[in-house]
Image (tube, rainbow, N blue to C red):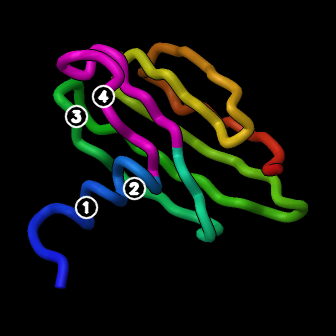
């Protein structure tokens, strides 16, 4: 039986992909690892505020993800196709890429 916060950490850090990329979450990295799942969504509390991530794999294995974070956040988003997008928080942003 798993106890403590391990399942919560695994969900936020691996499935949603939210983790600090700099001390104090000066930069937050979002790099989801879908595995066999077809969708996931959740909110992750960080020192800068709440980061929201929702992703799904649709028809023809198209990966789409919506991310929102506080304006004070700098985000580094890594999609499954390994493309990297750096942006400032404060707005909702949608990403899309085909899965290999």
**Cβ atoms under marks 2 and 1 closer than 8 Å:** no
Q: Which labelled disc corresponds to residue 20? A: 4
Mark 3, residue position: 46
Q: CA distance from mark 1 to mark 3?
A: 14 Å
Q: CA distance from mark 2 to mark 1?
A: 11 Å
Q: CA distance from mark 2 to mark 4?
A: 16 Å
Closer to the N terminus: mark 2 or mark 1?
1
Q: Which labelled disc corresponds to residue 8? A: 1
Q: Nearer the viewer, mark 2 or mark 4?
A: 4
Residue lying farthest to the right in this orientation: 60
Quadrant position of residue 7:
bottom left
Question: Around disc 4, counting alpha carbons within 10 Å, would you say few (fewer than 14), some (14 to 19), or many (20 or more)?
Answer: some
**Cβ atoms under marks 3 and 4 closer than 8 Å:** yes
Question: Around disc 3, counting alpha carbons within 10 Å, would you say few (fewer than 14), some (14 to 19), or many (20 or more)?
Answer: some
SS at mark 4 in the image:
strand
Q: Which labelled disc corresponds to residue 42? A: 2
Residue lying farthest to the left in this orientation: 4
Closer to the N terminus: mark 1 or mark 4?
1
Whether the magenta-drawn stretch holds residue 17 is answered as: yes
């Amino acid at each position: 039986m798993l106890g403590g916060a391990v399942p919560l950490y695994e969900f936020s850090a691996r499935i949603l992909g939210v983790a600090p990329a700099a001390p104090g979450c000066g930069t937050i990295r979002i790099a989801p690892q879908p595995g066999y799942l077809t969708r996931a969504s959740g909110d992750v509390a960080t020192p800068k505020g709440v980061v929201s991530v929702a992703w799904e794999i649709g028809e023809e294995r198209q990966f789409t993800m919506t991310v929102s974070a506080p304006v004070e956040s700098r985000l580094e988003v890594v999609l499954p196709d390994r493309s990297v997008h750096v942006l400032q928080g404060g707005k909702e942003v949608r990403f899309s890429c085909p899965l290999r």
